[in-house]
Image: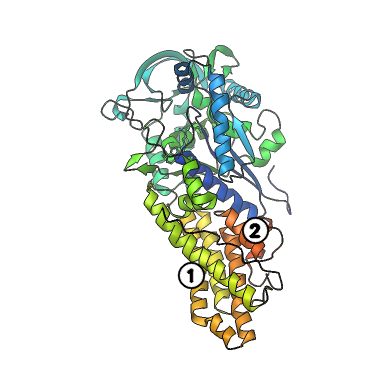
Amino acid sequence: MRSRPGEAQPFYVTTPIYYPNDVPHIGHAYTSVAADALARWRRLWGDDVMFLTGTDEHGLKMQRTAEAEGITPQELVDRTSPTFRELATSLDITNSDFIRTTEPRHHAAVQQFLQKIYDNGYIELGTYEGLYCVSCEAYYTEDELMDGNCPIHARPVERVTEDNYFFQLSRFEDRLLEHYDARPEAVQPETRRNEVLGFIKQGLRDFSVSRTSITWGVPLPWDPKHVAYVWADALFNYCSAIGYATDRERFDRYWPVDYHLIGKDILRFHAVYWPAMLFAADEAPPKCVFAHGWLQIGGDKMSKTQGNVIRPADLIEEFGVDGYRYHFLADQRFGPDGEFSYENMLARYNADLANNFGNLANRVLNMAVSYCEGVAPEARAEGPLVEASRVAFDGVQAAMEHLDFARAFGAVWDLIRAANSFIEDQEPWKLHKAGDTAATAAVLGDCLEALRIVALLASPVIPRAAAELWTRLGLEGGPEDQRLPDAAAWGLGPSGTKLDKGAPLFPRIES
Ligand code: ME8
């Protein structure tokens, strides 16, 4: 059951659940920060947001990593999963839940789900012989390999022969094509949709959903000698966390998911296997799978397997949480591949946050504190910043519909630039010197109100600075307590509030 009239609209967004076979890097943080900005944005609209992230703890990769360390897989994941939880906390990620696939609630859901697909006649026993990449936890055909290696990890694959249960993916070709035809928005961006359609049209092959060669996984309820294949287990996390096995009413409230945010490396699993398995279990497919590109370093995908990872903690220490979030959201297009460059991050931090944004806030607050006795003058009902604020709000809204965080932030930036040039034009310091109190107050009142709108619209990306600015403007609560669209209307404050100039919001970094 979705919402009733007048009730908050449910909105469900997920990140992939990450393999905790090593500590997290900026690639993992990338998807989580994006999902967080989206979750915060939807909360501003009053939605009842369910935001899920977590760790994917079964499979051969985890078992082998544990063996290499001489510990059990359970010991390994109990040690490493918390580092992913800590990563989320360190980036102010507001996830509602954190699921681990080793939890009983997940086991129960996987078993119930697979049993349903089995009972519906879409799983049968067979023998598999194929080429397996342990890093991907996926099979490849000869022609998918690059120079005989896995096309993603550039590492050798293994020949594997096993008795497996197979999911009859081949029976879902038409259903998937019909689904994507009826819902073009269900895979984004467009290039990824075309990739998915191309893959389905080539013809789908059944895939194995169980293993007998390992024991580290969820046993199949009808044949416990087999454990669920790690992907058949992992994908269900999205359902287990919202009560698939325990609370059908809650499940029906949030399912189908609004957005699965993923990297393009796991597109097929999410946009082909997953909806087909959901169809087979009589459940609805995701409303949208959005696959972003890779963060690269020197043209290579950054990954644990490639050994070229950058730790988020180092960058957070230098740039702060907001500086970090700003770079990965506003400085990189969400969709295409992006190259990480420290120099670029530093340059944009100083130019955009320290200079443009920080200066506007500091100048306006400083002048208002000294020229207006620390009390915010009222914004005028009309003036150049009224239209600029409206355009900024419309721009953010339109861009967020397409998860275009960079364009959304660009729209906020236009408002900041408009306010900065308004100050240059009006020269309130001269007005003040000339004793024109009314004109000084008018200009600063407009700028303070523009700053309130900037704080509101920027809050999903730079929540700390936005909240700090809100407080300095003397406003009650924080940006996250506001409700759109009303809160974006011009003239709601901070008239008559006590201002606080404070220290620079984004001190320049010289390194
Ligand atoms: O694939 N650039 O886990 P994983 C951008 N457990 N994003 C990146 C990235 C990079 N260089 N590296 C990682 C798995 N990511 C499975 C998922 S879901 C049911 C199971 C991000 O630890 C991106 O979101 O390999 C990618 O899809 C995910 O981390 C893969 O994380």
Q: Is residue 126 left or right of residue 83?
A: left
The kind of secondary structure element at disc 2 is helix
Residue position marked by numbered label 2 in the rendering: 479
Measured as percent of width and height from the top left, residue 2 is found at 68, 45
Image quarter hosting the N terminus: top right
Q: Decide: is 485 above or below 171.
A: below
Measured as percent of width and height from the top left, residue 448 is found at 61, 71
Which residue occupies 65% across, 35% down?
242
Residue position marked by numbered label 1 in the rendering: 417
Q: Decide: is 210 above or below 455.
A: above
Q: Nearer the viewer, residue 311 or 250?
A: 311
- Amino acid type at circle 1 is Arg
Q: Is residue 319 left or right of residue 343?
A: right
Does mark 1's beta carbon lie closer than 8 Å to ligand 1? no
Give the CA distance from mark 1 to mark 2. Answer: 21 Å
Quarter assignment of residue 163: top left
- Amino acid type at circle 2 is Pro
The kind of secondary structure element at disc 1 is helix
Q: Which label number is shown at residue 497?
A: none
Residue 183 visible, this orientation: no
Which residue occupies 45% across, 50% down?
334
Residue 188 visible, this orientation: yes
